């Protein structure tokens, strides 16, 4: 008996044949090769599904992290806004007593009357550090937020407020007009700047 096409790897999936005593007889051998190919195809499908699930999981995780960051930033800004409001109210309280202001510059939150054409003092970064601005004491619920304010005299007596504030009617006699600016910053970089015009008779 002799075997024909008996390659062990079965490249062509042809059945083995045996010729014995003049009879042509098939010998099974292709079934094992077909099963191996099916197992290989199933493994590829499983790997592709695993890759898809991994990509979807990473995308979902990234979306969750982004939402957490956005929520954290909104919360930090809300805390900074509340701190700036607190500083603004303290600045208005300081202006309400008509404080004696320095002739030039700023000291402990009180600033000299600004000169026309000059850059507003509250736009300077240095005024919010050191003893030029007044620091506000905040509670532990503000989580490390820093708040400061400055008070500027922008006009007084009749006919002077319209120069600084842009209002058509002049100030009443004896009225002092102050500009109160408050700034709050949080450790994560959130910053809020509030400003009000405060009139004191």
Image: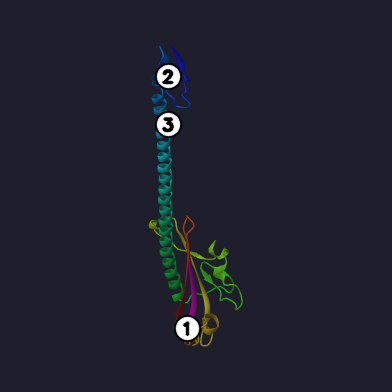
In this view, which residue lies farthest toward the front?
Answer: 22
Q: Quadrant of residue 117?
A: bottom right
Q: Nearer the viewer, residue 54 or 49?
A: 49
Q: Is residue 139 above or below residue 31?
A: below
Q: Quadrant of residue 14?
A: top left
- Residue 153: % across, % down: 52, 77
- Residue 50: % across, % down: 41, 39
Tell me which residue sits at (56%, 68%) in the image.
Answer: 123
Q: Is residue 186 above or below residue 34?
A: below
Magenta segment:
176-182
- The residue that label 2 is drawn on is 17
45 with respect to 118 (left or right): left
- The residue that label 1 is drawn on is 175
Give the mark nearest the N terminus, 3 or 1. 3
**Label 1 crowd (10 A; few <14 / some 14-19 / many >=20):** some
Q: How is the image coloured?
A: rainbow
Q: How many angstroms separate mark 3 from mark 1 (CA)?
A: 90 Å
């Amino acid at each position: 008996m002799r075997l024909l096409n008996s390659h062990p790897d079965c490249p062509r999936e042809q059945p083995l044949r045996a010729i014995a005593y003049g009879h042509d007889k098939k010998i099974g051998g292709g079934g094992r090769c077909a099963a191996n190919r099916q197992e290989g195809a199933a493994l590829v499908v499983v790997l592709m599904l695993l890759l898809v699930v991994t990509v979807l999981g990473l995308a979902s995780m990234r979306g969750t992290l982004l939402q957490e960051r956005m929520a954290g930033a909104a919360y930090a800004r809300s805390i900074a806004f509340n701190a700036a409001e607190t500083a603004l109210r303290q600045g208005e309280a300081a202006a309400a007593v008509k404080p004696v202001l320095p002739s030039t510059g700023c000291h402990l939150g009180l600033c000299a009357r600004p000169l026309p054409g000059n850059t507003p003092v509250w736009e300077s970064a240095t005024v919010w550090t050191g003893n030029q601005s007044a620091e506000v004491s905040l509670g532990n619920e503000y989580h490390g937020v820093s708040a400061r304010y400055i008070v500027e005299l922008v006009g007084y007596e009749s006919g002077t407020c319209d120069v600084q504030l842009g209002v058509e009617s002049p100030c009443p006699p004896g009225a002092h007009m102050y500009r109160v600016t408050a700034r709050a910053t949080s450790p994560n970089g959130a910053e809020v700047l509030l400003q009000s015009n405060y009139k004191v008779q």
